Amino acid sequence: VQLVESGGGVVQPGRSLRLSCAVSGFTFSHYAVAWVRQAPGKGLEWVAVMSFDESKEYYADSVKGRFIISRDESKNTLHLQMNSLRGGDTAVYYCVRAPPRFSLGNYFDFWGQGTLVTVSS
Amino acid sequence: EIVLTQSPGTLSLSPGDRATLSCRASQTVSHTNLAWYQQKPGQAPRLLLYATATRATGIPDRFSGSYSGADFTLAITRLEPEDFAVYYCQYSDASPGWTFGQGTKVEIK
């Protein structure tokens, strides 16, 4: 199982950024997937989750209305569209798999290496 | 919203010691939805336990989990040098939401 994030970088406040996560080693359509972030020197914060069948998506209150999670089954890829970025969004963003299969996910068993997003003018 | 409070913030121990980490939920929760992670500096977190006490693939049996009501415990018997890290508990609820505790750092004394 592998999850590889890309798309991080430095972005000005108010601008947008799109993260991607290429997954392999498992049947993508069987699992919920999510984004979890970690601000520098801080703890972990769940950001967004999408169910295995794309029927449900949920967001943390801190990003609701600004971030959009999506998945491309044909390319085994997860995305996070981040709009109206703020300084508080500065963090390493991890792509994660959320078992058990065919559910919304209870925990996160495989993590990518993370991609750093820095929001700064 | 469920809040997870981990204690202590930092645990200073020596290799070979036993570590006991606590995670207290703000209300009664299902033990099937509680997980523990380990994170070392510069690395992504790693799943240790799910459903409170089930070890993830490849996790040695010196790691164990238990609970009593809203209190969850991660125990590490005989600390190895590679066990010094930060540990997080996490709960998934019906809101739905996936909440993490603030972490406990296990450092070398």
Image (cartoon, coloured by chain):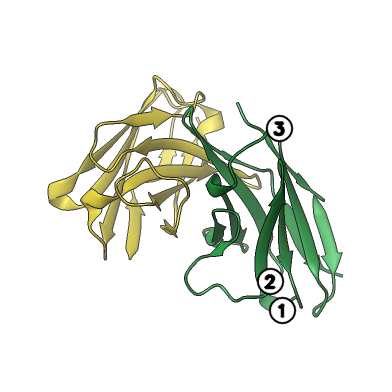
Helix, strand or loop at mark 3: loop
Question: Rounded to the nearest whole Å, what is the CA distance between mark 2 and mark 1?
Answer: 5 Å
Residue occupying the point 67% across, 57% down: B87
Q: Chain of mark 2?
A: B
Query: Which mark, residue B83?
Result: 2
Question: Rounded to the nearest whole Å, what is the CA distance between mark 3 and mark 2?
Answer: 28 Å
Q: Report which residue position mark 1 lands on.
A: B80
Say which of B66 and A49 sits in front: B66
Q: Residue furthest top?
A: A65
Say which of A68 and B19 sits in front: B19
Helix, strand or loop at mark 1: loop
Say which of A33 and B63 sits in front: B63
Q: Is residue B93 above or below residue B20?
A: above
Question: Rounded to the nearest whole Å, what is the CA distance between mark 1 and mark 3?
Answer: 32 Å
Image position, residue B71 (x, y; %): 74, 45
Image position, residue B84 (x, y; %): 71, 69
Specify which label sits upstream in the sequence, 1 or 3: 3
Amino acid type of the residue that numbered disc 2 sits on in the rendered structure: Asp
Amino acid type of the residue that numbered disc 3 sits on in the rendered structure: Ser
Q: Report which residue position mark 3 lands on.
A: B26
Is circle 2 on the same chain as circle 1?
yes
Q: Which chain is yellow?
A: A
Specify which label sits upstream in the sequence, 3 or 2: 3
